[in-house]
Amino acid sequence: MPEHQDRLDASALIVTGAHLLAEVHDRPWAYWLAERLRAALGEVVVCSDLWYLNRDELRGLPVVSIGAPGVNALSAYFASRLPSVLAVEGVMVVQMATELDAPQACCWGRDEEATGAAVQAFAERHLEAFVDAVAP
């Protein structure tokens, strides 16, 4: 029987909420974004906010949080801590800090369609800066 390894070889994480609505609506966007990040960074892992917030070693990795603060605890944490790089008032927000040792970003909207638009806007407008900050 192989020995279980509790080590994660990932260049970055994408975090969605463990809430059922986040699993249904936000996780597909997380996998969509992961494919785009893998092209530049290698291994990118999608996980829930519960894993991320409860594992110290994960919090040292570059991260993109997807989903509204009501369904994603990491987004709730980032909401008042990360600067907005794109905001459409009452519709969607993209937040990002690339100057950190482990860059952080957050994409969310008022509903699942707006969250998808936020993820797409992040990919189109800010993904390159995020990647550059992760792998300078």
Image: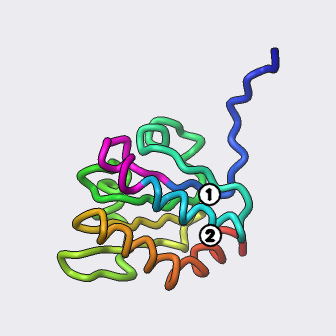
Residue 40 location (% of width, % of height): 71, 71
Q: Position of residue 26 (x, y in %)?
A: 39, 56
Q: Which of 62 and 118 is in front in this view?
A: 118
Residue 135, x across and y down, in percent: 71, 70
Seen in the picture, residue 39 relative to 66 is either above or below; the reply is: below
Hey, which quadrant is residue 106 in on the image?
bottom left
Image spot of residue 114 (x, y percent): 29, 71
Q: Residue furthest bottom?
A: 125
Q: How many labels does the image show?
A: 2
Which residue is the site of mark 1? Answer: 12
Is residue 109 within the magenta segment?
Answer: no
Identify the residue at image location x=51%, y=45%: 47
- First-in-chain label (2 vs 1): 1
Give the left or right position of residue 36, taking residue 115 as reference. Answer: right
SS category of the residue bearing label 2: helix
Is 105 on the left-hand or right-hand side of 9? left
Q: In which quarter of the image is residue 88?
A: bottom left
Report the residue at 32% width, 74% height from top. Answer: 93
Query: Which residue type does callout 2 highlight?
Result: Arg
Viewport quadrant of the N terminus? top right
Q: Is residue 48 above or below residue 62?
A: above
Q: Find the distance from the CA under tag 2 to the CA under tag 1.
A: 12 Å
As drawn, the residue found furthest toward the left would be 90
Name the amino acid type tagged 1: Ala
- Magenta residues, start to end: 15-26
Q: What element carries label 1?
A: strand
Q: Name the residue under label 2.
A: 36
Residue sitting at 35 percent across and 58 percent down? 67
Residue 91 in the image: above or below residue 33: below
